[in-house]
Amino acid sequence: MTNRTFDEMQPGDRAELRRLITADDLFVFAAASGNSNPMHLTDTDVDGNGTAERIAPGMFMASLISAVLGTQLPGPGTLYRRQTLDFHTRAHAGEEVIVRAEVVSKAEGMVRLRTEVTHADGRQILTGEAEVIAPVEKFDREDVEVPGLVVQRHRHFEALLERARPLPALPTAVVCPNEAKSLGGALLAAREGVISPILIGEAEAIRRAADEIGADLGGIEVIDVAGDAAAAELACRLVHDHRAAAVMKGRLHTDDLLKPMLDKAHGLRVGRRFTHVFVMDVPGHPEPLFVTDAAINIAPDLATKMDICQNAIDLALSLGMEPRVGVLSAVETVNPAIQSSIDAALLSKMADRGQIKGGQVEGPLAMDNAVDMGAARTKGLKGSVAGRANILVVPGLDAGNMLAKQLAFISHAEGAGLVLGAKVPVILNSRSDSPMSRLASCAVAAIRHFAGAR
């Protein structure tokens, strides 16, 4: 970072900054300034044109002028004296803006600059003038670093819970909830009115788990069954008998839970392959982010990936989302040596031809240009999915599992897990999942079930 001293500057000197406005910018500005105007914190149809947008507040746009003056022209050492601003139009999250400053005059240590912020197409957002005390000493360093910020919130899961609470409690067969976390998650969802649990497993072990967390099982049905396989088979029977409308995993292996469901005669198959979806609430992300398949299909072929896409699209629609499927690969161009890039291109074309319905599908996309508009624009990618994908279809289970856990343990996301393609939603949590993850999984299952019932 370098500055321009008073002696170095001349009328006509210019500097500019390009900035892609993100939803996180507006949340950070709200937290720092106290400006919690919902017009820029929530998606609102302000113009009445049917499009929900977050409006960038005027003073946030003005702060971008300060960024140019403080870092480029004059740069470090600049002191503000006064500034005038005229606002002409709005800017919205997702738009790129250009911030410019031009020296008009200088005298007695003071520099007057013409300032403006425009849309990328030249439309003016604001104009004005700034008067500053210019630095007299040279500053030139490369080690200036501003700490990064993570906007941590789980508003998406809270919104899902608000949608699930008014629904009837979902009758749920909870298989082998014989340890504290799995039982506690089911009971928490019951207290919230999201599910009505039927506890299946060794009754004595279930009661010991209840004593461990100080829970009262009064009024909750407990079916005493010995062995994981028998408990999972009984859960299937309860679904066929219309006593359960969902199945929830307790402390047993996923394979043992799913094996009886895949039985052709007595299982829960309905035609599609079973696929798993992580519904991730990622801090700073504007909507839930799906990762699929990260738990069941190890190395899915094209036909399996078609079901993975369709199941995820159907779930997104039931949650009220606009499904935008980014089919991931290591690259965003088709490479015959990379099978995932070929599959991605075929899935994209299958969606164009109506073989995958209800959502937009694009691929291949690399991870960065699937979720980041700046990266997508750098690569010259256009369309409605690149940079805005809310469903990420991964090449295989290992990539999906690593991605979901990276989001959880490094990016501080919460993840709800659901198996789709069965007769009823299957709530699939891991032992390390938090109570919020378990509760959100139940909420997603309830919304999905009752959306399908309408």
Image (cartoon, rainbow, N blue to C red):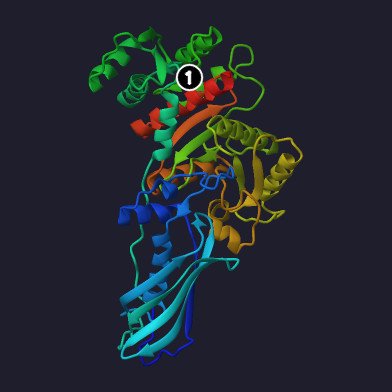
Q: Quadrant of the C terminus?
A: top right
Mark 1 residue element: strand
Figure check: 423 above or below 399: above
Please name whichever residue, 5 or 191, is drawn nearer the observer in this view of the structure: 5
- x, y percentage for residue 273? 63, 27
- x, y percentage for residue 55? 47, 53
Q: In terms of image quadrants, where is residue 6?
A: bottom left
Residue for point 39% across, 86% down? 4
Please name whichever residue, 90 or 43, is drawn nearer the observer in this view of the structure: 90
Identify the amino acid type marked 1. Answer: Val
Figure check: 367 above or below 220: below
Please name whichever residue, 80 or 231, is drawn nearer the observer in this view of the structure: 80
Residue for point 38% across, 89% down? 106
Number of residue marks: 1
Residue for point 67% across, 46% down? 344
Q: Is residue 214 visible?
A: yes
Q: Quadrant of the N terminus?
A: bottom left
Would you name the residue on which mark 1 appears? 247
Residue for point 45% across, 21% down? 248
Figure check: 214 above or below 353: above
Q: Is residue 365 left or right of residue 60?
A: right
Q: Is residue 265 left or right of residue 254?
A: right
